[in-house]
Image (cartoon, coloured by chain):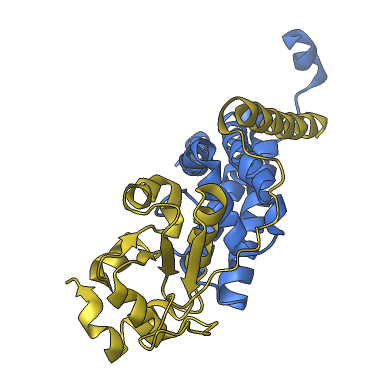
Amino acid sequence: MTIATKRNLRSMIAHVCAFGVAAFFLYAACPKIVDPRQFRIDISNYKILPDEYTNLPALFLPWLEAFAALALVWPRTRRAGAVLIAGLLLFFIWAVYDAAIVHGLDISCGCTGKDSGHAGWTTIIRNLVLLAATGVSVFLPAKSSRAFMPVVEVPSEIASSLV
Amino acid sequence: MLRDLLVLLAVLGLSGGAAVTTNLAWHKLPWLREPAPVVSSNVAISTTGSGTTSLATELTPEILVEHLQNGLTRFVDAREEYEFAKGHLLGAINLPASAVYASIDRALAVISPNDKVIVYCGGKTCDASKTVSDVLLREYGYRDVVVYEPGWEVIGTSPLFKDFLTVGE
């Protein structure tokens, strides 16, 4: 396998990961954008916020998920999108762990709107996979460009003739 | 780095703007929820067999059976649809907490705001019954909604309820 092929492969894997994570986040955000009242209930079940304040994240978080997903798709904004997506995923992992594992609450995860399934280890593992894919989408191309970009010293006379 | 920071701020700003716009134009949710109203629900049916008003303050399995026998109380099962399909109280309406707004028409069609409603879910560890009860009381004008906290854990196993169950496959 040539260096160029390896670089293309890494770049393709990074794109696939970014598109995969973005697609999941857009799929998850749509039903919550359409019905924030139901999402409010899911947030309320986690018992992280006082009930009075649950409407605010129910209205804001789905849009953040959607725009962060769009930022992840476009290579020029991917790093910022990845930071936001990773932040959201880490927060969701902590919330599920705290509510379902530590406090033993039997609640719907609320990840993808209706029929999200119960919050628990499955949710945590899925979020960890998404987190890993987000990392791959950002770090894999950068690593490949450092690892496979040969450093060639060009003689000054040749360099000046190229300019 | 600066571009990443600007993109990050732009995404946050766009999300906030979209949330505000859609809420003002479409959802019209209050930004802050009002505290839950204090509702004094009488858990017992109006009179006992001897003609005296029951003084019970806790909804016990025996009182629940009285409600099932009198035929006036409405029951709401707040568990998921697949759990409801496996078994539920006779005549109970399934209003899963994970899709309460999508399923609310089922309740609105047969329960009037003046009816006594008893909501149950899987057991003491689930909050679904409290969630559904809260929605019925706050957002749909029901006045007498009570949660049966022991839920399906007791209903599904106690011999008291064997004549009042529908058991699926």
In the rendered view, does B47 fall on the left or right side of A145?
left
Q: Is residue B120 above or below residue A90?
A: below
Q: Is residue B56 visible?
A: yes
Residue B51 coordinates in the image, percent (x, y): 40, 84
Task: Give the colour chain B carries in the figure.
Answer: yellow
Q: In the displayed structure, does residue A92 sit left or right of residue B112?
A: right
Q: Nearer the viewer, residue A101 or A133?
A: A101
| Residue A51 on image: x %, y % | 68, 57
Q: Residue at x 82, y 31 (%)?
A: B2
Residue at the limit of the structure toward the left, as seen here: B169
Q: Colour of chain A?
A: blue
Q: In which quadrant of the rendered view does residue B115 lie?
A: bottom left
Q: For the point 52% across and 58% down, which residue is it?
A: B143
Quarter the N terminus of chain B occupies: top right
Res. B61 image quadrant: bottom left
Task: State the residue in front, B163 or A110.
Answer: B163
Answer above or below: position of A155 versus B148.
above
Does residue A2 appear in the picture of this structure?
Answer: no
Residue A39 % position (x, y): 54, 49
Quadrant (top left/top right/bottom left/bottom right) for the C terminus of chain B: bottom left
* Residue A142 screen position, x and y as percent: 65, 40
